[in-house]
Image: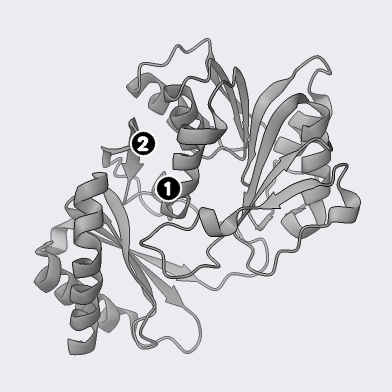
Amino acid sequence: MTELIEILTSNQGKLDSWILKNKIDAYRLYDRELEKFPAAIDIYLKKAHIQIYEDDSTANEDLLIEQIGVAVERVLGIPKKEQYFKSRRRQKEGAQYEKVASEKERFVIKENGAKLIVNLKDYLDTGIFLDHRKTRTLVKDEFAKGKERMLNLFSYTSSFSVVAAKAGVRFTTSVDMSNTYSDWSRDNFQLNALEKFNHIAIRENVQVFLENMKQSWRFDLIVIDPPTFSRSKKMPVPFDVQKDHPFLINHCLDHLNQDGLILFSNNFQKFKLNGDAINTDNVQDITKNTIPEDFRNDKIHKCFLIKHSK
């Protein structure tokens, strides 16, 4: 445990000035640097969200929780009652697991001029993906500038939409298959005083939505951030990002204004963009520009900027 305390102390020391300068409310402190502590530790204000990655070789989980909890309290002063542990077990392909409690302990963090609701207890994820903080900053500072209409697919709790709206995008449409996350999106819109008729959340299978979208619908900015794999009763067939990404991108190109752009991202570390199957050659890999300072794993996601062919 001494080694873990040393790493946490070192990592926090390296991040302190960056956190203060950029007014960071939530960040990743530790990400499996030590083999015997297979965990990711994220700090949200004065609370810790700790994910333990389990497989058949993982040591006793109760002992890991005790040791990590002690280390977090010693280094950061965060007491056990403000530490939230989750288990990320190796799942069979497409297995679904999201809700882990029903306490509804929600609070608000700030990022990129937006207020965003997070919940560290009830779900495996917290309501915001910290690895896309820098991507959202690019949306705010560059991609949303001068844009009128935005489509956000696999929108989760719609943080991309909120940030874009705060940056001046007048209309946003956010699509996610989950009723829970669609409601969460609407709460985020309301929290940020966004006009509910201009910023809408639609509960729908993204593939079905794209197939049935009116041809007249056009967007200046489209964000696509799908899961690696998904199987649900709401889906006629499972979704596989490696196989299905050309379908997503090509349908979005059909609804993209001529000078618009698509931001496509995913977390599949072996992902390869199938350029031959995409109806444009104007694709830029911007992954290196989207990895935040607090993430030491530069393979946490892949990100592409896609436009119509010149």
Helix, strand or loop status at disc 1: helix
Foreground of the two, 152 or 16: 16
- Residue occupying the point 50% across, 46% down: 135
Q: How packed is label 2: few (under 14 Cα within 10 Å), some, or many (20 or more)?
A: many
- Residue occupying the point 42% across, 24% down: 166
Question: Residue 65, located in which quarter of the rendered image?
Answer: bottom left
Q: Residue furthest front?
A: 310
Give the percent coordinates (x, y) of residue 100: 40, 54
- Contact, CB < 8 Å: mark 2 with mark 1? yes
Question: Residue 223, located in which quarter of the rendered image?
Answer: top right
CA gap, disc 2 to disc 1? 9 Å
The quarter of the image holding the C terminus is top right
Foreground of the two, 248 or 95: 248
Give the percent coordinates (x, y) of residue 222: 66, 33
Q: In the rendered image, which residue does mark 1 sit on?
A: 133
Q: In the rendered image, which residue does mark 2 sit on?
A: 112
Foreground of the two, 88 or 31: 31
Q: Is residue 247 left or right of residue 47?
A: right
* Tag of residue 9: none
Mark 2 or mark 1, earlier in chain? 2
Give the percent coordinates (x, y) of residue 11: 25, 71
Q: How packed is label 1: few (under 14 Cα within 10 Å), some, or many (20 or more)?
A: many
Q: Is residue 237 visible?
A: no
Helix, strand or loop status at disc 2: loop
Relative to 63, is 156 above or below?
A: above
Q: Is residue 37 visible?
A: yes
- Residue occupying the point 61% across, 53% down: 286
- Residue occupying the point 77% across, 50% down: 245
The amino acid beneath tag 1 is Arg
The amino acid beneath tag 2 is Asn
